[in-house]
Image (cartoon, rainbow, N blue to C red):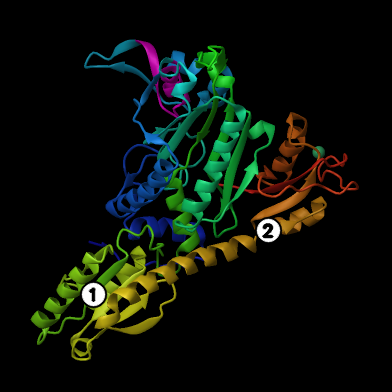
Amino acid sequence: MSEQEGLTVKKSKDFSEWYSQIIQKAELGDIRYNIKGFIVNRPWATMLMNNMYKLYEDELQKNGHLPVLFPTLIPASNLKQEEEHFKGFSAEVFWVTEGGSDYKKFEEKYALRPTSETAMYPMYALWIRSHRDLPLKLYQRCQVFRYESKMTRAFLRGREFWWIESHNAFTTREQAENQVLEDMRMSEDVMHQKFGIPFIFFNRPAWDKFPGAVYTYAADSLMPNGKITQQPSTHLLGQNFSKRLGIEFGDESGKKDFVWQTCYGPSIWRMVGSIIGLHGDDKGLILPPEISPYQIVIIPILTNKDKGKILSSAKKLFSKLKKSGFRVFLDERDFYSPGWKFNEWELKGVPLRVEIGPKDIQRKHVVFVRRDTGEKKFVTDRSLITSARKSLSDIQKSIVKRADNYFNDKMFVANNLKELSSNLKSGGFVQVPFCSVDLDGEGCAEKLKNDFAGVEVRGTRVDVKEKPKSSDKCVVCNRSAKVLVYVGKSY
Ligand SMILES: [Zn+2]
């Protein structure tokens, strides 16, 4: 199964190398596929993503969103219908221009979807006639393609990645704005509580909002090196798309109006990147029990004398746990030593290891070992199920808490460039007074980016209303500050 030994570098010493080794050694992905920026997601990552998709889709469906699957190709003419949107994406589009053995050129070029607004909304225009057809709340789970010019990184930045995109249409602005709030709640309930990824939603500055949106709320998380990773964003599209594409409905009196729209895009693939980075340690991955492909791995301590007896006890243990609904794996390979298997499953981040050997059978107990803390305990046969449930729930909570503590320790405040410069050394977010998040402030954001090697203005907080003091000055231009923004270095 595994080709090599464990990690040879410490996470705190060289995070980038640690991250690369874990992708390869925990068999998450293979970057050797021969197209730049495209990787193979191996079974361990695919099983993990399937569990993540399941939780996200359950939550979407619970909130009234229905699944749909649209074609991967989008005609260029569709993309061009919304000018601002097209301008924002044109540099990142892969085009399909010919087909067949004679490489016949198509009359029109087709984009590999970078996102699906312009595939879906012309169909919305056909489907929506009356207020009775609304709200329309659809999502699809699919991969999207971006012609990335920046360096790609497995599970963080790729030319192909896996996500969910949710596209919604309503009769009023208020309903659409409520959808944005619901998207933020779903991010909290799934991404934070189940995947253990802490974040803050920022209202992105005008120059950084989604092309074609009225506003963009984007969730920023952090990696252990203090760099920001953008996680899902939710956008109020207003009537920008519906006016261009003619998505109209008649109200009760038959009066026509354009629908109000939102979209939301959680990238499951990129969340895997955050999970690897935030939770893992020097031994490998640490996966939250809610999503780990296996929650429990049983390792029989086989001796020549008692092999048959131990294996049969281990199998009983397996079926008992399986029947109670745990995702459990029995590692009965006899060509590897127990120690080798311990390392392997620690590398892969399985939350709970159960060991069973000859002495344990005699004493009617098994040994539980927690992946996150290494803590060992004896569990009697009778309390097996309740103990397993309790241990997994404790592990889940402590993984979330540990990530939260790290995240909360990386919030800083600076009032001038000198303080900013010293705060930036620790990574994370720095709150600074700033002149404006309208286009007016873009120059200051550019200057900051140039002077501080890539530091970006991430926006104002959505969850807390924060105002600068009347004496506060923009850290860049020294004009009177209108907003408090958060800045930091991102992936
Ligand atoms: Zn300024």
Q: Is residue 157 above or below residue 248?
A: below
Stretch in magenta: 107-125
Sequence order check, earlier mark of 2 and 1: 1
Q: Position of residue 414 (x, y in %)?
A: 78, 55
| Residue at image coords 46%, 50% | 271
Q: Is residue 234 above or below residue 77?
A: below
Mark 1 within 8 Å of ligand 1, using the beta carbon: no
Q: Give the crowd class for mark 2: few <14, some 14-19, many >=20 residues within 10 Å.
A: some
Q: Give the crowd class for mark 1: few <14, some 14-19, many >=20 residues within 10 Å.
A: many
Farthest residue in the front direction?
Answer: 253
Q: Secondary structure at mark 1?
A: strand
Q: Nearer the viewer, residue 42 or 381?
A: 381
Q: Amino acid at mark 2?
A: Met
Q: Position of residue 68 (x, y in %)?
A: 35, 31
Q: Tell me which corner region of the image, top left, top right, bottom left or bottom right, holds residue 287.
A: bottom left
| Residue at image coords 68%, 36% | 205
Asked whether residue 213 appears in the rendered view, the answer is no
Quadrant position of ligand 1: top right
- Left or right: 155 as drawn, with respect to 177: left
Name the residue beneath numbered marker 2.
411
- The answer to whether residue 175 is magenta is no
